[in-house]
Image (spheres, rainbow, N blue to C red):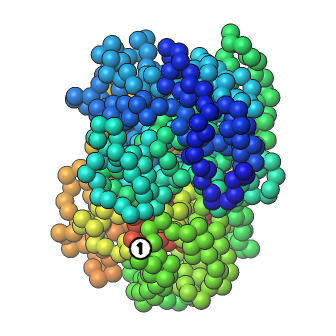
């Protein structure tokens, strides 16, 4: 039976199965005869690409033992945890999970006897999964070539409330088959649910099973063009729900095997526990080994990168030379848009000095109060309409229409982009299509940045909760610096700086991070965030070359905002390192060449004109972070090689993350020559 769209395969077992009885895989029960043939057929007909989802392959005795054992792991490196083992909280642009070290470390060469003696069930499971019998079964279902018995590549993953894994295709190195074994469980005393049938474990210590409404499903994406390989679509076309003891596996195909893990949205101690990993091609010395043509692989990956590269909004060049200074007509044009204080000579001089020094700046209360009120009302109304009560994980089409379309590809980003006229959000449309392209705003940017804007590409974006994100991307190291200009328009982020509400804005994602580009030895798709490491200490010293462990503190030249003067704090516009609380002062205090300037306190919030450039020398994590914001303009001069991303916005957020802005190509301002005539 072919699997249709949004369907989950049956977990029904045929009684005619062959139980393997060996010292390493006695816990395996494999399908035979007609049932095996049925699995082959289902695999071949599955959409959007071939995959299998089969339950009952491994004994409950073993699987329950693995769950019991997992409750003894503890945080890796902390007192009381197993030496060399335990949970590591990991958060990057692409995922947020807890994970153990690799299963290959379950060996006397890597772990002390004390630790191995505490992990007998997991060791048995690893041996069963990578046994000859089990690998032969996977080959029979998928029709793939030989699989390595030497190369073990997997880990135990723990998804709890807020955990997620964004779209990817798993195509790294010699991976051939990807798998996930589901072990979902809840505490024995967890609240009952009417929509899920949970079964007590043999000793009654936990409940087995999962409710699809809790999230965590495996999402499968088609190729957008319908071709065999290409860019992934912006909406999933298949979904595999989490079921106890079910094994899902599929062939890893670059540019084809796109998948993600839906956010887990339930608490109450419930765990989407699983063992996941890959079967690899045979290693040298194993039967079926074939040497890999490294040059061909490099060429294939280069071609695939071109096929799947994200289409970008083209730069629109200005038709005239950059204006020099703000004219009265410029100020008259900007007056309905910008707060009055941002148009005074004293303020502009101060902004320019701050930006030249730090190459990044945040301006609070940027819009004219009347315009800001309209913007807030419109975006809040749209969210109230699209997120009805009780709807936690939104539908994929949420927010589409009225000028807003989904922008992809999902391998790079997903959010709603304003592409045409809108009746529900006219203020953000006016900022996008009238203010940002204007010569007046160009002149204002030139004055503030001391740079000459030569071209622009702008966009209004809506990041829907439970759906949207961008992955790390940026200019090539050989490229040119860009001036990023983004106005935060998120209505629910309208809170007082320095308050608990302000501190909580980053709790549900949606923050933007600037990061140093990885070394060639690192995986450019994965970066460790400062939030993931906040308050934690690793057992060992940081691994400078571990792609999934650290962001390396590679200094870049030029813009301090993303280079030698930056640090890893969250840039929520509150002084750190023992400085005074700005909420208890009379307003921002910024000097230019030693001279203090005065401001109208009604036009500014505490900590206006903040930058991260003076807050210390922390050497790990993002170069700059900006929490979701309302009516704040962020200007950053981004160096070549510096990457950025907007973290996935959790379903637990109050509403969407809204912003409008873009990036400007810039040149150096030429000083005016004195006219001696």
Image coordinates of residue 366 in percent, x first then y, are: 42, 77
Residue at 44% across / 15% down in the picture?
107
Residue at 47% across / 76% down in the picture?
387
Q: In the image, 193: left or right of 286? A: left
Q: Nearer the viewer, residue 642 or 96?
A: 96
Residue extending furthest front?
15
Q: In the image, 111: left or right of 498? A: right
Q: For the residue carrying disc 1, how many other residues have a C-alpha within 10 Å: few (<14), some (14-19), or many (20+)?
A: few
Residue at 67% across / 24% down in the picture?
136
Q: Is residue 214 visible?
A: no
Query: Which residue in the structure is indicated by mark 1?
Result: 390
Q: Secondary structure at mark 1?
A: loop
Q: In the image, 496: left or right of 156? A: left
Q: Quadrant of residue 326?
A: bottom right
Residue at 65% across / 42% down in the picture?
52
Q: Quadrant of residue 457?
A: bottom right
Q: Nearer the viewer, residue 197 or 633?
A: 197
Image coordinates of residue 289 in percent, x first then y, are: 73, 16
Count the numbered circles shown. Answer: 1
Q: Is residue 36 visible?
A: yes
Q: Nearer the viewer, residue 406 or 73?
A: 73
**Against 215, is 335 above or below?**
below
């Amino acid at each position: 039976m072919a699997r249709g769209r949004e369907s989950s395969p049956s977990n029904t077992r045929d009684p005619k199965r062959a139980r393997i009885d060996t010292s390493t895989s006695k816990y395996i029960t494999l399908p035979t005869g007609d049932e095996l043939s049925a699995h082959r057929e289902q695999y071949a007909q599955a959409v959007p690409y071939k995959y299998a989802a089969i339950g009952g392959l491994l004994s409950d005795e073993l699987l329950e033992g693995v769950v019991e054992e997992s409750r003894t792991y503890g945080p890796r490196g902390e007192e009381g945890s197993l030496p060399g083992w335990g949970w590591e909280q990991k958060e990057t642009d692409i995922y947020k999970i807890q994970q153990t070290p690799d299963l290959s470390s379950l060996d006397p060469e890597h772990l002390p006897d004390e630790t191995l003696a505490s992990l007998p069930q997991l060791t048995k499971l690893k041996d069963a999964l990578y046994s000859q019998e089990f690998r032969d079964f996977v080959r029979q279902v998928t029709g793939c070539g030989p699989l390595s018995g030497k190369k073990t590549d997997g880990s135990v993953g723990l998804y709890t409330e807020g955990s997620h894994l964004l779209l990817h295709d798993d195509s790294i190195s010699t991976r051939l088959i990807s798998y996930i074994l589901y072990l979902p469980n809840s505490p024995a005393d967890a609240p009952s649910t009417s929509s899920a049938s949970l079964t007590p474990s043999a000793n009654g210590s936990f409940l087995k099973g999962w409710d699809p409404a809790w999230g965590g499903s495996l999402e499968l994406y088609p190729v957008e063009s319908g071709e065999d390989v290409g860019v992934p679509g912006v909406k999933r076309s298949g979904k595999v729900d989490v079921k106890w003891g079910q094994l899902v596996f599929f062939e890893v195909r670059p540019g084809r095997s796109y998948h993600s893990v839906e956010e887990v949205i339930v608490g109450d101690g419930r765990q989407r526990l699983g063992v996941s990993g890959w079967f690899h091609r045979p290693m040298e010395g194993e039967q079926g080994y074939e040497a890999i043509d490294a040059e061909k692989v490099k060429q294939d990956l280069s071609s695939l990168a071109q096929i799947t590269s994200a289409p970008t909004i083209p730069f629109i060049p200005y038709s005239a030379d950059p204006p020099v200074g703000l004219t009265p007509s410029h100020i008259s044009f900007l007056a309905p848009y910008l707060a009055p204080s941002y148009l005074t000579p004293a303020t502009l001089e101060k902004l320019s000095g701050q930006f030249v020094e730090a190459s990044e700046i945040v301006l609070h209360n940027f819009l004219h109060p009347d315009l800001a009120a309209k913007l807030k009302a419109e975006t809040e109304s749209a969210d109230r309409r699209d997120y009805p009560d009780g709807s936690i994980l939104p539908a994929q089409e949420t927010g589409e229409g009225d000028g807003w379309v989904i922008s992809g590809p999902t391998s790079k980003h997903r959010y709603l982009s304003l592409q045409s006229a809108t009746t529900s959000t006219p203020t953000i449309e006016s900022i996008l299509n009238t203010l940002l392209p204007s010569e007046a705003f160009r002149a204002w940017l030139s004055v503030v940045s001391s740079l000459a804007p030569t071209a622009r590409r702008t966009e209004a974006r809506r990041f829907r909760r439970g759906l949207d994100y961008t992955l790390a991307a940026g200019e090539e190291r050989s490229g040119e610096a860009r001036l990023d200009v983004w106005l935060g328009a998120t209505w629910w982020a309208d809170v007082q700086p320095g308050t608990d509400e302000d501190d909580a804005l980053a709790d549900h994602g949606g923050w933007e991070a600037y990061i140093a580009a990885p070394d060639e030895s690192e995986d450019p798709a994965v970066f460790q965030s400062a939030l993931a490491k906040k308050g934690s200490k690793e057992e060992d010293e940081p691994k400078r070359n571990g792609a999934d462990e650290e962001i390396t503190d590679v200094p870049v030249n030029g813009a301090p905002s993303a280079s030698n003067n930056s640090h890893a704090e969250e840039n929520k516009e509150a002084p750190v390192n023992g400085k005074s609380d700005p909420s208890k002062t009379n307003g921002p205090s910024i000097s230019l060449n030693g001279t203090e300037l005065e401001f109208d306190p009604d036009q500014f919030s505490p900590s206006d004109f903040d930058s991260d450039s003076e807050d210390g020398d922390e050497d790990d994590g993002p170069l700059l972070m900006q929490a979701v914001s309302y009516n704040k303009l962020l200007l950053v001069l981004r160096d070549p090689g510096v990457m950025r991303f907007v973290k996935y916005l959790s379903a637990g957020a109050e509403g969407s993350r809204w912003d409008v802005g873009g990036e400007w190509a810039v040149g150096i301002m030429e000083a005016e020559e004195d006219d001696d005539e």
